Image (spheres, helix red, strand yellow):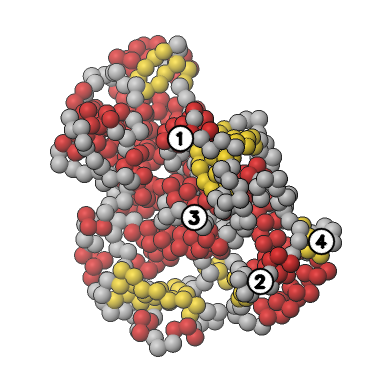
Amino acid sequence: MDLLRAVLGEDHLRIPDRHETRQLLTSPLQVHALAGRLRAGGDTHVSARELLAQLAADILQREHPQTSRDVWEALPRLAARILDRQGPVQAGSFAPQHLLWELEETGLVVHDSNLLHFALPLFEQHFAAQALREGHTPLASAAAPQSFPHWRYAIAFIVAAAPDEDAEAFMRTLTRTNPAAASWVLDEIATPSGDRDPPPAAAAGEASANSGGPEQVPAVARHLREATLHWLAGLEPLGPLLARHEGGQLIPWAVQLGHNWLTVAQARPGVLDEDLVAWADLASLPTPLTRFHHQTSFPAPLGRLACWERARSQLRTALANRMRQRTLPVAPTSPLAAERAWFLARTIMAKGRLSKVGQHILLADLRPELDILMDRVANTVRASWQWAHGHKIDSDDVRWLTEHVSHIQGDALTSPRPPGDRMRPPPRYVLRDALIGYHDLVQLNFPRFGAALGLYSIFPVRAEGVVTMPPDESQSEPATVMYALRPDAQSAKDQPIVDVRLSDEPDYPAGSFWRSLRRDHDRSSAFRLPGIAHQEASLPYHERQATNLAYRWLSQDLHAVGWLERPVNFP
């Protein structure tokens, strides 16, 4: 920010405090590009991809290096080799000496200690995009879980510059290879709705009709369903939890298109004979729920890549609900499963009086209570229960707990958290279980996302921090926990290293330890986080603390790649 003020000569420059804008200020090159945009009367609502793509083209056009065809052909291959290796390449293994000299003379490539790299990452991504276009590297390989963070701008460059038909093909590959990559690219190249070109005449004419007719399914509806199926394929095994399935397939849709609005209804079993059926007067049915699970109407997604955006929007709404409810699948052995089981069993047995439940619940007492609730579940479409001053549970909770209890060895369910000495629960156990649980969530639900998820990209990690007790423990003030998550190859994924110290001096964390954590946090970006620092109050009797922490980390990572509209927090 100081550099931007200096370049523009404005001491009191103010820009919006948005995550996207802050990311533009993470390198001098981007700062100079942003300054040029602001001088020309532009604003800060611009993606890094737009800044970098234009900047690379401008520099090459201005400098216009005079060199041979062999050099221009070698540059994309060099970029691909560097990104695949995730570092400089051996000069001798890449090209003969005369070509190495020519590469250096362009000013684009640096030859140092027999290693080759580009003078600026900007040129690396520019020529990597050319490598993708020319087929030196397959798009699926560049978008793979561990490769995507390094190739991301090159991928965004080619999708943004491609004709509509090619861009559609690129999205089909990206969604099936890595839905995180596809989502991030979609946001990176998105055009604000007010700046979009009007739909082609054919599409506009189609959208103005009152109905697709009983024999003709609107093309936009077919395209939307195809985009949804591609997203779901990439999201396996999570897909069936985000959209209704029947017999392992996405349930049939009835659709109606009229006056630029598309109505989609998800059919109940036996209502439709085909996956996609045009239904006249669908939007005005008096009792749609007798034949359809759900019905919605929205502006027809007719613009460039609009069906991909709309399909993702529908799926991420369902994902946000799962995140808020904290019900993504985990293995029975996960600490998150232990927390959920204890929370549900305690709620059922306490019936609003949690103090009557100790550290153990006998399965012989729990099973009869579950049998009573399961009888209700079996005879209703959906049921829920809430006792006085208690938490609400529903049919899915009861089914899950019944299944989970069947895997428990022994005759009792035990609280997953050991009694605390001066705090309940101790932060060390919470952080340990949250890290294990976060890793479990990603491995089981988002296996194709990989290094696109910030915290997951630095695993294995260690947690280190400080717990500051309140000045007077008799007061209601909670203890404060400050911690950092850092890469550590010695830390096991199933037993991460957690080093949390206790301090009775409230001012201690304001020293160098906490400042170093904040510096790490300020330097971090959506990819390859050097460390993640947090400060929060640890509430003494907060339910499912490790679960809440794991889901908060995951929600921040999913938000960074566009799979959540906003992070999910728990009070």
Which residue does the image show at 49% across and 55% down from the upper left? 569
Identify residue for label 1: 518
**Mark on residue 352?**
2
Q: Which residue is mark 3?
A: 569
Of mark 2 and mark 1, the one earlier in the sequence is 2
Q: How far is the residue under mark 2 from the one under mark 1?
A: 41 Å
Q: Are marks 2 and 4 in contact (CB under 8 Å)?
A: no
Q: Quadrant of residue 480?
A: top right
Q: CA distance from mark 3 to mark 1?
A: 20 Å
**Residue at left 55%, top 50%?**
477
Q: Quadrant of the N terminus?
A: top left
The location of residue 248, given as percent across then percent down, is 59, 66
Task: Confirm or deny contact between disc 1 and disc 4 (CB under 8 A).
Answer: no
- Real-space Cα separation, disc 1 to disc 4, in angstroms: 44 Å
Which residue is the site of mark 4? 412
Whether 298 is drawn above or below 288: the answer is: above
Mark 2 or mark 3, which has the lower sequence index?
A: 2
